[in-house]
Every structure is written in structure tokens, then in C-alpha cells.
Amino acid sequence: MSSALSFLGLNASQISPVVQGWYPPTRENWELIVYFWQFFPLLTAAQWLTDFYPQGKTSIDSRLNLPGKPAWALMESTGFLTVLYCMLAIPAQTNTGPLPWANWTMAGAYTLHYLYRALIFPWAQPTMSPIHPFVFLSAAAWNVLNGLSIGGWVGGYGPASEADWAGKLYQIEVGLVIWGWGLLANMFHDDDLREIRRSALRRQRERAEREGKPVEGVEKLYMLPKNGLFSYVLYAHYLCEWVEWAGFWVVGGWGCVPARSFLVNEVSTMLPRALAGKRWYVEKFGEEKVAGRKAVIPGIL
Ligand SMILES: NC(=O)c1ccc[n+]([C@@H]2O[C@H](COP(=O)([O-])OP(=O)(O)OC[C@H]3O[C@@H](n4cnc5c(N)ncnc54)[C@H](OP(=O)(O)O)[C@@H]3O)[C@@H](O)[C@H]2O)c1
């Protein structure tokens, strides 16, 4: 039985399914999830037709709105928790031996990213706009489905033994390097956006101190970011995240359909958002200030 279970002081009988057959999925159900998950880009067609996206820059006033930070933390936690649960529950359910170290490496990379995205990211944001339940539920569902797709693969329905990874060390190393640089670059550009509000808050505090007045909020202050890749594209943080998950796909290999779907599905939902975001920047700051910067792919789009 999986050494991960014994490491946690658990045995297989203590890992009961949350939803019989689906969470964790049986192999047949996992194959169905992976198959249909490839068609997610078709669902994003609506995003090309409307700029409606009640979160962040385009959040709306609604009585239903959820506070930005906790809602973000919750909706972004569902994915990595699902992957980790699959890593424990699938071997327990199928009564198979310990998973290969490369499976744990992929699960670790996924978890590391989402520990940052779900917990550190909202905690570090000076402010975050409210999130509508529509975005909250869509994002949480997206993360669970992606978590099941990836979690099933690394949980034993993909490679299940060291032999399955034989000869793939170079691919794993190259993929991890791409993944790591993508993650760092994504964090760098996220922080550049944060700095806009941090520095505005610092300036406001200094002014308020000088004038003996209370500090005004910086709730929805937006400026044009310009450091790093932001000098070429307005959504540099998105681009870096795509590089990161392209690296993750390299680790899993060409035939790793869940890693490919993850990247394709992210691009399909984030690309229309970046294009809509560019229209928002042009409307707010004017064509001249945007100065020919592309939305997300330097020189192209
Ligand atoms: N959205 C997605 O579908 C998606 C999917 C997967 C991964 N991600 C990743 O999640 C991270 C955040 O994504 P996001 O869509 O929320 O990005 P975003 O709209 O650019 O917002 C990121 C944060 O920066 C603030 N911000 C954005 N533009 C700003 C500006 N011009 N001036 C000052 N502050 C600004 C936002 O504040 P407000 O909240 O107040 O607007 C928000 O807190 C990114 O690293 C992205 O790669 C997003």
C-alpha cells in the first residue's frame, strides 16, 4: 500500500470516497472526465461575445458579491486539494503500491503553484475587488474538474511505476526548468501589479500624515503596469502562467492529455479575458498611453 498513507499514519480503509465512483474517480469515470475536459474550450465561446466577467476590473455592484480575498482563496484551493486527495485515495481504492517519484514531482509542482495562487496571492494583494458567485462557482468547478483530470493521471491511472518513467529524466528536468521560470515570472508580474496599489497607499499615507487627514482607500486604483514583460504586453502575468503550464506538460510528456488540456483550457479562458482587458485599458487610459502594447502575446495579440 502507498507509502504516502503510512507516512500520514493512515490505512486504505480510512480513505473513503467522497462521492462514490467520482471523487476519487474510478478509472472509467476518470477516462470520461479526461475525454470531455478536452472540449472545455467550446464552452468559452461565450467569452468572445461578451466582456461580462463580474470580477476584478470588470466586477459589478451586486448584493450577491463575495469579498474578494476569501472567495479567491476558496475557489483556488479546490484544485490542489483534489489532486492531493486523488494521490492518496486512488492507490487506496485500487490497492496499488507506492506511486513513482515523478508522479509526486508533478503533484508537488501543481500544489506549490496553487499554494501560492490560493493562499499567498490574495493575502499579498493590497486590495482585491469583490467576486460574483457566478465567477466563484465557475472557477471552483473548473479547478475540481482539472484537479480530477490531473489527479487521476498522477494518482495512478497514468504512469504507475518507475518503469513507466524510464528514459524520461531529461524531459522531466527540462519541463521543470520551464515550469519553474514560468512560476517565478508569473509571481514577479503579479507583484508588479501589487506594487501599483502599495506605492499609491504609501503616497496617500504620507500625504495624509502631512495634512493630518485620514487615509483614503486605494480599493480600485488602476494604473498601466510597465515593468518586465508588461512593457510589451498588458497581461504578462497570464503569458508567464502559460509558460509555466507548458513546462508542466513537458514534464508529463507529449501523451499526457490532462496536462495538455490544462494548458489549452487555461489559454482558451484567459485569452478572451486578456483581449477584453486590453479594450478596458484602451478605454480607460487611451490608445496613446497603451502605446501599441499587445494584450498577451508580444508582437502578435
Ligand atoms: N482569471 C483567470 O481566468 C485566471 C485563470 C488562471 C490563472 N489566473 C492567474 O491568476 C492571477 C490573477 O488573475 P486575474 O485574472 O485576477 O488578473 P488581473 O485581473 O490582472 O488582477 C490581478 C490583481 O491585480 C490587480 N490589478 C490588475 N490590474 C491592475 C492595474 N492595472 N493596476 C493596479 N492593480 C491591478 C487586481 O485588482 P482588482 O481585483 O481590484 O481588479 C487583482 O488584485 C494571474 O497571475 C493569472 O495568471 C487567472
Image: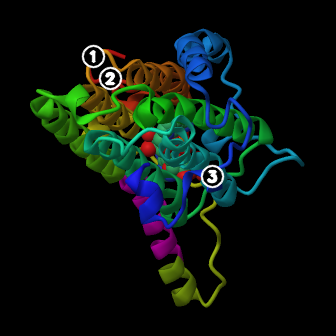
Amino acid type of the residue tagged 3 in the rendering? Ser
Please tell me which residue is depicted at 69% across the width and 29% down the height of the picture: 21
Residue type at numbered disc 1: Trp
N-term-proximal mark, 1 vs 2: 1
Provide the secondary structure element on which disc 1 rests.
loop
Above or below: residue 272 compared with residue 84:
above
Task: Say which residue appears at 27% left-offset and 24% top-offset.
Answer: 298
Instruction: Measuring from the top left, give residue 98's x and y in whole percent.
Output: 36, 45
Task: Give the spatial CA distance, label 3 vs label 2.
Answer: 49 Å
Q: How many residues crowd mark 2 within 10 Å: few (<14), some (14–19), many (20+)?
A: some
Report which residue position mark 3 lands on: 13
Callout 2 secondary element: loop
Q: Residues within 10 Å of mark 3 (few under 14, many from 20)?
A: few
Expressed as whole percent of the image width and height from the top left, the position of residue 63 reads 90, 49
Contact, mark 3 vs mark 1 (Cβ under 8 Å): no
Q: Give the residue pinned by disc 1.
A: 254
The answer for how far apart the CA atoms under marks 3 and 1 are is 35 Å
Q: Report whether the residue tagged 3 is closer than 8 Å to ligand 1.
A: no
Label the magenta part by its dominant secondary structure: helix
Q: Label 2 amino acid?
A: Ile
Residue contact between numbered discs 3 and 2, judged by CB atoms under 8 Å: no
Q: Residues within 10 Å of mark 1 (few under 14, many from 20)?
A: few
Residue at the extreme right of the image, as rendered: 63
Number of the label disc, if any, that sits on residue 297: 2
Quadrant including the C terminus: top left
